[in-house]
Structures are given as structure tokens and as C-alpha cells.
Amino acid sequence: MGHKNPRGIAPTFFLKPDRQAQEQAVSASFTVKHPILGFVCAFAAVVFAWGAQAQENRGSVTNLPIPRYVSMKAAEGNVRRGPSLTHRIDWVFKRRGMPLQVVAEYGNWRKVQDRDGAGGWVHYALLSGVRTVLVESDMLPVRTSPDPNAPVKAHFESGVVARLGSCTIDWCRISAGGYGGWAPKSSLWGVDPNEIRE
């Protein structure tokens, strides 16, 4: 329990000094002799890099954004060290509706992590696209409208799992236990800071 997934470190590439100097000289010569063509090539390189980055941010199986938030569909789910039944179970998630973040995909398996960054591989059938959030502030006031001066409808304790509704840039509509209203997005885990939901 408490195992955190290691994060990959991007490799660093070095050029030999003479090769680097040659490339800089060629690049400078190319820029001076062909400024318009140089601009077009630079623009194409930026567009290609942006497209490659956008492609990297999509799941290889679902083509959905990575990372993205989901919730636990099952009341209990085994969290494995790798994406198959042969990998050992590191621990068990035991909270239906708990928000999780999908950080990788492999076949029918999703690598997820919780609010603390702990996680592992879970079979996709145990997950739901229904969005939930974890309340991070104690006695969080839930208001009638997305306004800090609006009347308070209820207070949610820290650790409450709430259903996520619409969101503005600063506020989200949440509901739990028959109560609902607007709460500051900064007090919730399971929604991106810049995420807008209708």
C-alpha cells in the first residue's frame, strides 16, 4: 500500500562539439541565404511538433485525452503492478465513485492514480466515465450560485465524493447525499483548473 508509480525521465541527447558546430554553420547559412524558406521550414517544424505532442496526449487504445478523469464503477477494484491478471495486486480500491486520473492505457487496462498519486493498473470494466470529485476543504460551503456571496445550501466535509456537474473557470456544480450547489474549483480534486463543463 502507498506505492507510488515511478515517473519516466526524458532522455537528454548530446551532440559532439564538431558536429554541433557544423549544424549551426549550416543552419546560419541556410537562414541567411533563404530567409522565407527558413521561416516556412521553422513554421512546419513547430506545427509538426505541436501535432506530435497532441498525438502523445491521446490514449493509444481509446484515443481519449491522457491524462483524464474517471471514477470507480465497482465497489472494489484490484490495482495491479502491470496491465495483466498475471501481475501482482499491490492493493485494492474500495470506494465506489472515487475519482481517479487515467495516465496510460494498454489493451483493456488503464493505469490510474488517486489524489495522492498512488495507483497502478486497473481493468477498464471497473471504471466509469461518470465524473466525480473529492472535496479537499473541510466544511466546504456549497452555494446556490457560482458567487462567493451567494447563500450557502450545505457544507461538505473533507473527503466527500461528490458528483460533478457543470463548471465555469472558477466554480463547479457538485452534488452528494441529496444536496447540491456550487463550490470553488480550487477546493475539489478530479477536475482540471482550466476545465469548462456545460
Image (spheres, rainbow, N blue to C red):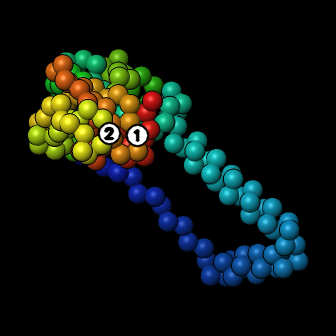
Q: Amino acid at mark 1?
A: Thr
First of labels 1, 2 by sequence position: 2
Left or right of 110? Residue 90 is: left
Residue at position x 78%, y 62% in the image? 41
The reply to whether residue 133 is visible in this rendering is no
Secondary structure at badge 1 equals: loop
Q: For the N terminus, give its image quadrant.
A: top left
Q: For the C terminus, give its image quadrant.
A: top left
Residue at position x 18%, y 43% in the image? 136
Circle 1 residues within 10 Å: few <14, some 14–19, many ≥20: some
- Which residue occupies the foreground of this view, 24 or 19? 24
Q: Amino acid at mark 2?
A: Pro
Secondary structure at badge 2 equals: loop
Q: In the rendering, at what x and y percent does residue 153 appear?
A: 18, 30
When asked about the image quadrant of residue 43, the answer is bottom right
Of marks 1 and 2, the one in the foreground? 2
Q: Which mark is residue 168?
A: 1
When asked about the image quadrant of residue 93, the answer is top left
Q: Which residue is mark 2?
A: 146
Above or below residue 43? Residue 35 is below
Left or right of 79? Residue 83 is: right
Q: Which mark is residue 41?
A: none
Q: In the rendering, at what x and y percent does residue 73 appear?
A: 28, 19
- Which residue occupies the foreground of this view, 94 or 182? 182
When asked about the image quadrant of residue 24, the answer is bottom right
Q: In the rendering, at what x and y percent does residue 4 appear?
A: 24, 46
